[in-house]
Each structure stands twice: as C-alpha cells, then as structure tokens.
Image (tube, rainbow, N blue to C red):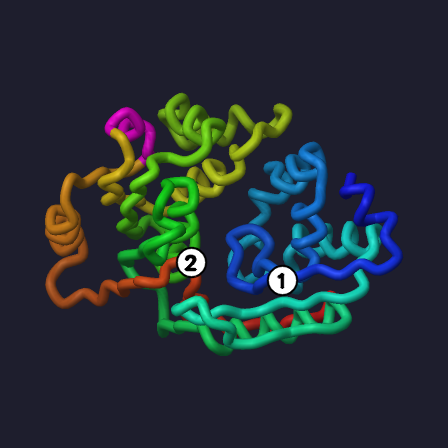
Amino acid sequence: AIERAYVEAEVHITLGFIEQHLMAGFSGGRKLVAPGLAWQETIKRLHSPHFMRDPRAVEGSVEENPLHQELLEIAGMAGHDFIVDVVMTEGRRIAGVFAGEPREAHRQGVEFVREKTTARLPGRVRAAVTTAAGYPLDLTFYQAVKGITAAAHIVEPGGIILLLAACDEGAGAAEFSRLLKQSPDAGKFLSEIADIPVTVDQWQLEKLALACRTHRVWFYTPGLPQEYHANLWGRIFATAPEAFEALAAEVGEGAAVPLIPEGPYVFARAGEELTPVAAG
C-alpha cells in the first residue's frame, strides 16, 4: 500500500537524487514512490529474499532488475506524473538535474551517473580495499555494507574485500543490531530467513551474507563495538596497518589491489560491457 494522500492527489510529483543502489540498481525516480511512500508491509515485501537474492537486483542493474520493474509498476499504479531528480558531486553540489516524465527523465539521469562514475578494470582482481565513502555513510555498519557489495563486482570469487569504515555510531538501528548479534553464521542466517516473514533491516544483513558466501570479507571498523565482532563472518583487524600487512601477504608482491575511496558511489566494473538503460 502507498500513502493515501499521495495516491488521491490530482498531480503526483517527486523530488529525489540518483546514485548507485545496492538493490534497485540506482536510486531516484520510482523509488520515491516505493518504498519512499509505502507502508511497512509493502517495504518488507520489496526487501524480501525473492528480490534480495536475485543476481540482477544489484548495483547498476536496471533493465533486467526485477525489483526495478516492480517499483515501476507500483509507481505507475499509484500515479507518477513528474520527477525532479538531481545528481550530486563529491562535494555535495548539484552536477545535473533531470526533470520530466518519470521513466525517461530517470533513464537519462542513470546514464549520466554511469558516465561520470564508471571505473573499469580489464578483469577481476584478487583483492580490493573499499570504504563507505566516509561521512555520513560510514557512521554505521549498516550503511558501510554498501561499500562491500559495490566492490564485489570487481573481485574474483573467493577473493578478499577489505572494508575500511569508522562506524562511529556503531552497528545501526536496533533491529539491525539485534540481527547482527544473533547471526554467527552467514549460511545459517540465509537459510533461517528464506521462508519466514521479513523483519525490518534483515535485507542489509542478507546482502552482507551473500557477499560473504562468495568472497572473503575483512573488516577494519574501529567504531563497531567488540560485542559484534564474533558475528561479522570475516576477519577483523584492530588497526589499518595490520589489515594492509595481512592483505599484502595474501596477494603477494606486485599484485594490483584497487582502492575505492568513494565506495558505493563508484560504478566499478571488470571486463564486461555495460548494458544501455531502457526506460522500463
């Protein structure tokens, strides 16, 4: 269900911004209607394992992304007449404004973001160092997960993803913190939530679990309290130099290890061609 006041309005206009998104491909456009104005049960359905485990429901994926298509359908039924979406620079200044018919304006915005943020490698690497792009995303571990999933696109299966994130405000909201504390095994967690009602914030931990199933994930997250360390499903380091030394020992001398200081804001890809974005 969508907020009644919006649905009953004569004209439906949304304001938003476009960036890479770990589930919907890119933010903005249809995402302002759902989940933006959706009731909690609808939000839970959109974040269920049905979508979270689909390999097409990832960063940068739009045309074939089933979650994107679902959001378009919901927005169409609720009413979506006009959008004004912006793209922001690293310094949080406006780099582009995309306004008009929702599907076409959003498509143009996505193409713009891809053009400006794509970083391409000739092939996948054995390891990468990623971040949550500093403040404000790295305030919590919940948000820092986005840096891990974004880096997974350029690291070979079984390779290492090292996350550097301050996490000065700890794990995140109460629901996510509780799940993180009680889930010592990624595979068990994925099995447990596969066929039960969705709980708030489980989707972020699910995305982390999926990354930990395909890659070795290491963490330097000094602000995350010790009580969570046992359940991070990876190797934890007390200092950044220790993490770098361990990484160097793993990959060997002369190995290329990309550093992604902008984390989830970089459209990082290895080898494959980019698919043009359709309006839906």
Residue located at (58% from left, 63% from top): 17
Task: Give whichever of discs 2 and 1 has the lower sequence position.
Answer: 1
What segment carries the magenta color? 226-233
Q: Quadrant of the C terminus?
A: bottom right
* SS class, disc 2: helix
Give left or right: position of 238 versus 71.
left
User: In which quadrant of the rendered view does residue 195 lie?
Assistant: top right
Residue 136 position, x and y percent, is 39, 52
Residue 243 position, x and y percent, is 16, 48
Check the image and report above or below for 93 versus 47.
below
User: For mark 1, what is the residue?
Assistant: 62
Q: What count of labels does the image hold? A: 2
User: For mark 2, what is the residue?
Assistant: 264
Check the image and report above or below for 92 versus 176.
below
Amino acid at circle 1? Val
Residue sticking out furthest to the top: 182
